[in-house]
Amino acid sequence: MAIPDYQTIMLPLLKVVADGKEYRIRDLIEILSTELDLLPDDRREMLPSGTQPLFDNRVSWANTYLKKAGLLHSSKRGYVQITEQGKKVLSSNPKKITTVFLKKFEPFQHFFSNATLAGEEESSESESDKTPEEELENAWKSLNKTLASELLDKVKEISPAKFEQLVLDLLLSMGYGGSRQEAGNLVGRTGDGGIDGIINEDRLGLDKIYLQAKRWENTVAIKEVRDFAGALLAQKARKGVFITTSDFPKSAYEFAHDIDRNIVLINGIRLAELMIEFKMGVSVKETYQVKEIDSDYFDG
């Protein structure tokens, strides 16, 4: 099943702690994942940034909002317990607890009036199914997606020589190729049977990676990938990277997966994403820091 949004999690969370015992948040996450019939793949799903499991994040926000409304409280770090107000809410048998529901409690009203909840306005009854952290990360992801598309358009406009330099710069930024001089002597110099260059996999040159780079507009035919694999075989090479500004058909990815050579296919969008990740051809416009309480400071 799909991972429930944080508002859907609030009522099940409150019911789990209804016995009045103190629960560790880490244990509650596991209990709720079982009660909500989450699959192992659901538990492994991460936030867009990859910094935390999505379900863990949503349970954390459900806990935060219930505490802000006075239905839960924490007597010590990482633990939570139901309050008398929380027990009263459960006794009324609510069908669901949402942020709109929580607005009837004064502590939450105060919290809500002093915090902008992503995707929701004070006067609106619409409810976002994403936590503020998810909204922020999804906005970041959307901006990067737009940037990748614009960046790829720029890459397609450059000369073949500049594209060759771009490939070199990217691989060096990713830690391949040794020094720039060593890499520059190899990339774009072979032209041997479908191979555009050879670059060191590591700084010591313990292994080589063979390259094919095509600044194309049309989809790369699978024949090109097969020819590249054949060129690797002829060189007794086992590792290759095929980079294009366009795309590969599904059959090419299947072919690369099935053969006994390790060939990585990088299409235009993936190329642009890697350029963004390794800060090539882009600059930082703004930096936003998301901070949290340093409990160690207050415990010391």
Image (cartoon, grey):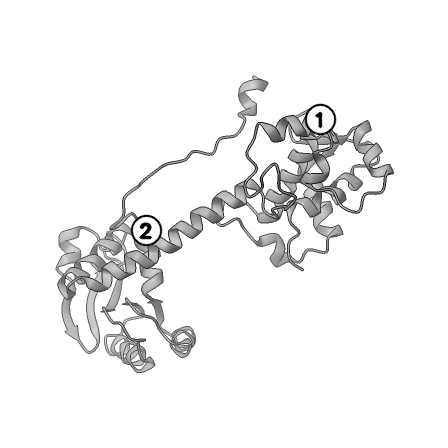
In the image, residue 239 sits, relative to residue 45, either above or below, namely below
Q: How many marks?
A: 2
In the image, residue 246 sits, relative to residue 227, either above or below, namely above
Q: Residue at x 57, y 24 (%)?
A: 295
Under mark 2, the amino acid is Ile
Label 1: how many residues lie within 10 Å, few (<14), some (14-19) or many (20+)? few
Give the left or right position of residue 132, taking residue 190 as reference: right
In the image, residue 2 sits, relative to residue 111, either above or below, namely below
Q: Is residue 280 visible?
A: yes
Under mark 1, the amino acid is Glu
Mark 1 or mark 2, which has the lower sequence index?
Answer: 1
Tell which of 266 and 209 is nearer to you: 266
Residue 276, which numbered label? 2
Q: Position of residue 5 (x, y in %)?
A: 64, 49
The mark lying in front, picked from 1 and 2, is: 1
> Splitting the image into 4 quarters, where does residue 93 fall?
top right
Q: Kindly identify which residue carries mark 1.
A: 106
Q: Residue at x 40, y 50 (%)?
A: 143
Give the left or right position of residue 79, taking residue 279 as reference: right
Q: Secondary structure at mark 2?
A: helix
Q: Secondary structure at mark 1?
A: helix
Q: Position of residue 16 (x, y in %)?
A: 78, 41
The N terminus sits in image quarter? bottom right
The C terminus sits in image quarter? top right
Label 2: how many residues lie within 10 Å, few (<14), some (14-19) or many (20+)? some
In the image, residue 247 sits, relative to residue 40, either above or below, namely below
Q: Position of residue 29 (x, y in %)?
A: 68, 43
> Splitting the image into 4 quarters, where does residue 82 fall?
top right
Q: CA distance from mark 1 to mark 2?
A: 45 Å
Q: Position of residue 158 (x, y in %)?
A: 17, 61
